[in-house]
Amino acid sequence: MGFSSTGNLRSPALDRKLRLGFVGGGRGGLVGTWHAAGARLSNHWDIVAGALSSDPDNARASARDWGIAPDRAYLSYAEMAEAEAAREDGIDAVVICTPNWTHHDIAETFLLAGMDVILDKPMVNTLEDARHLVEMQRETGLVLAMTYPYTYHAMVRQAKHMIKHGDIGTVRQVHVEYVQEWATGAADPNFKGAQWRADKAKVGRAAATGDIGTHAYHILKYVSGHDIAELRADFHVCGADKPLEDTVFVNLKMDNGAPGLLWVTQAAPGNFCGLRFRIYGDKGGIEWDQEFPEQLHYTPLDQPTQTLTRGAGAGMVAEAEVLSHMPRGHPEALTDAWSNLYAEIGLAVAHRREGTPLPEVPLELTGAEDGARGIAFIHACADSHEAGGVWTELRTPF
């Protein structure tokens, strides 16, 4: 399987489709359906096994929904890891899309069983667990991929490589926000996700900062090419009363000295999934809005603003073109970003397992170290807030 200038991350196909298992993601949840849709659309995976719910009836019903054979519909992840490791046609990789406090033990189990791991964010709850998974990935050589799908929009990758190529010059200031409304009112008692996200015993020191703040941090680092050196964070409850923050304001000092702002809230009525970045240099600026993912706004200094639209040619860099599948005017959206994520993970897993040649365009896989950096970001924000909003170093966690 090679890569040609007329191909993309989904095509040409692998020599065989990879076998994928799921832990979590059964009926009643959204996250699993996003993962499954992306895996299927990527053209590189067949979903063949799952421990889809801790509730036996839900697990069996979800397996039927997904077309998983009864003998590969498991009632626990431990049973699944043992059984699949013993099969000649066992899974090549497992997706873990359970709540984050369960991630470490599940990932450890499958890594020890010799299976590549695809892990939802945030990686884990504690820095100790994050470091342990990084060590395990390094020791085993297995793929441990994190699922930050927003960086798999073609125009996000376009922005990254325009900045890398110097189109806005030296980065002088950065702004990122992720704004939602769902936590403004009282929590819906039927929405389990709202319940555990507000439980300190389950999510640890932060709620919104971990849930969507890690997305904001990751996309800012990915696109700008700079990490945060120091930050100053203030946590707030701006919606209904709850034990953990639904809003965080963070002042940033980037590793090149540039200042920045990061704002995350789940209590801003009228906002739905407002992940946006604005990055400005001494030669221009770039802006992107997740709710309008097909367009990237680029303004060279002292020139009119250009609106770049996803597609092939017309200013698109090669690294972004491989994430684009439809002509302009035929919209692509979040499902396509998920498919790009799973296509890239599929190429990495196939290469590791079969020695399959990688595409000519380098993969930009988000791995274990990126997941651990997200946990370090959460804890640095919590440290800063708990100390009264003081400047706090964001240290590499490994």
Image: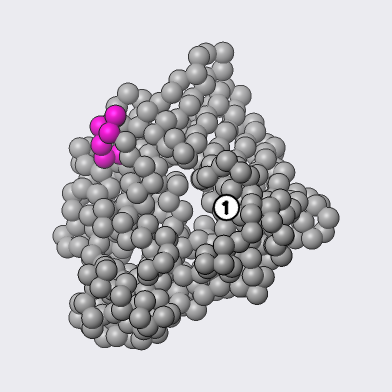
Q: Is residue 255 magenta?
A: no
Identified at 57% across, 62% down, the residue is 188
Quarter-of-image position of residue 220: top right
Residue 19 can be seen in this image: no
Quarter-of-image position of residue 306: top left
User: In the picture shown, does residue 121 fall above or below 326?
Assistant: below
Residue at the disc numbered 1: 182
> Residue 265 appears at what percent x and percent y?
63, 49
In this view, the residue in front, 265 or 226, is 265
Chief SS of the magenta region: loop
Identified at 49% across, 79% down, the residue is 105
> Residue 44 appears at what percent x and percent y?
24, 58
Q: How many marks?
A: 1
Secondary structure category for the residue under label 1: loop
* Residue lying at the far right of the rendered structure: 388
In this view, the residue in front, 126 or 185, is 185
User: In the picture shown, does residue 354 fall above or below 183?
Assistant: below
How many residues crowd around disc 1 within 10 Å: few (fewer than 14), some, or many (20 or more)? Answer: many
> Residue 74 appears at what percent x and percent y?
32, 82
Identified at 59% across, 29% down, the residue is 280
Residue 240 can be seen in this image: yes
Amino acid on which disc 1 is placed: Trp
How are the colours assigned in the image? one colour
**112 left or right of 378 in image:** left
* Residue lying at the far left of the rendered structure: 15
> Residue 123 appears at what percent x and percent y?
52, 65
User: In the picture shown, does residue 362 fall above or below 28?
Assistant: above
Q: Quadrant of the C terminus?
A: bottom right
Quarter-of-image position of residue 187: bottom right
**234 left or right of 202 in image:** right
Q: Which residues are magenta?
A: 324-330
Identified at 38% across, 63% down, the residue is 32
